[in-house]
Image: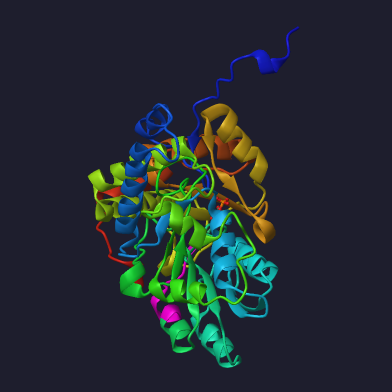
Amino acid sequence: MSPSYLDEFQPPTRLLMGPGPTSVHPRVLQAMTAPLLGHLDPQFFRVMDDVCEMLRQVYHTSNFMTLPLSSTGTGAMEAACANVLEPGDTAIICRNGFFGDRLADIAGRCGADTFFVDSPWGKPADVEALADELKKHRQVKMVGMVHAETSTGSLTPLTEAIELAHQHDALMVVDAVTSLGSHDVRMDDWDIDVCYSASQKCLGAPPGLAPISLGQRAMEVINRRKTPVQSFYFNLKDLEAYWSDTRAYHHTSPISMTYALREALRMMMEEGIEERLNRHARTSAALRAGLEALGLKLLADPQYRLNPLTAALVPEGVEDAAVRKQLLDDYNIEIGGGLGELQGKVWRIGLMGDGAKESNVFAFLSALEMILPGQGYEVAYGSGLAAAQRALASFSPAGSNEEA
Ligand SMILES: Cc1ncc(COP(=O)(O)O)c(C=O)c1O
């Protein structure tokens, strides 16, 4: 028998409705099949410039330093901390989920003295507690906050926290891995200093690139560093040289991924950023209505719910992993399980980027209605679907979460 690696690999066509990666549009996959260019080819520079320009629009910024890092979101977390922090600096990290914990871990690994503002998982970050913590320190270099906690499905409004950080001369570093492209992220209006995201969620591309943007205040702090940035790969000053007119080689760019991100962003420009956010709001309203009609409880508080990611509590007596397995095996639908303290306790259902569509909500809810009775959890067939349909029919956009 010949080894399986000699067989062509033909993955099944899944509906990726977990916390990311999300299913991407065929146009984005197609873009990756274009002929390779070298990373110093003037034609590729055009692609790079297009990507940066569109990212500035998505971030609502004029920051020159706006570019996609060659990494997933975690690399951007490392880049943000490694460039801003020097050993002995003080960092305050708000932790209200798995990714807040990760940010705190990374800040500590950069040699910072890290302090934490903790909130229960499922709640937004606690801005009053942040104000108290800031008062305890003479000089804080960075406040870190996760805008959209993908582990819990909760969104933290940012503007008050940013103001507080600046009152204490600290830089505000924001994780927008799951919010960029689905919720408002207004780098300039809100005065965010450093903000990063990832390609595989609401931007609608495969995993592998992490757009980051830095404002002037952050760049000045970086320019005044006394110690070199410990990371060669994520040294933003060197990366700036490659992404600016100098075009100095730093590392080989992931060419095909950059094509994919360009196409995904082009699709967002065609759709319009506002309409993209509305689509996420509309489809998530339908999903939530459907889940609640089936008797499922949602983890996040109603006024702080994330649109691209809904965390629903696994009902008593229902086996988390068995349901997810059946969704995958019988319906080709992937959703996520819980992370950390929520392992086995929640399902994380994503509606991100191209995946944020009504047909996906219907496919998922009807599959769930078919599966749950086999787990001893009775549902009235069609009740989740009907609630989702009613939510869609009566949906009206509510405006920015910052106004909530
Ligand atoms: C809020 C948040 N931050 C950071 C990350 C890490 O990103 P990645 O898994 O792309 O490295 C994720 C991934 O899901 C995330 O949801």
Q: Quadrant of residue 376?
A: top right
Taking the image as drawn, is residue 275 in sight?
Answer: yes
Quadrant of the rendered image holding ligand 1: bottom right
Q: Residue furthest right?
A: 1
Q: Is residue 11 above or below residue 191?
A: above
Q: Give percent across and percent down for residue 344.
A: 67, 51
Q: Is residue 394 above or below residue 331?
A: below
Q: Give percent across and percent down for residue 77.
A: 56, 61
Q: Nearer the viewer, residue 125 or 255?
A: 255
Q: Give percent across and percent down for residue 275.
A: 25, 52
Q: Quadrant of residue 40?
A: top left
Total numbered circles? 0
Indicate whether residue 161 is drawn in magenta: yes
Q: Nearer the viewer, residue 345 or 98?
A: 98
Taking the image as drawn, is residue 386 in sight?
Answer: no
Quadrant where the image shows the C terminus: bottom left
Q: Is residue 207 above or below residue 174?
A: above
Quadrant where the image shows the N terminus: top right
Q: Nearer the viewer, residue 109 or 186?
A: 109
- Residue drawn where x is 40% and y is 54% of the image: 246
Q: Is residue 359 left or right of residue 2?
A: left
Bounds of the magenta segment: 153-162
Question: Coloured how?
Answer: rainbow
Q: Give percent across and percent down for residue 253.
A: 49, 42
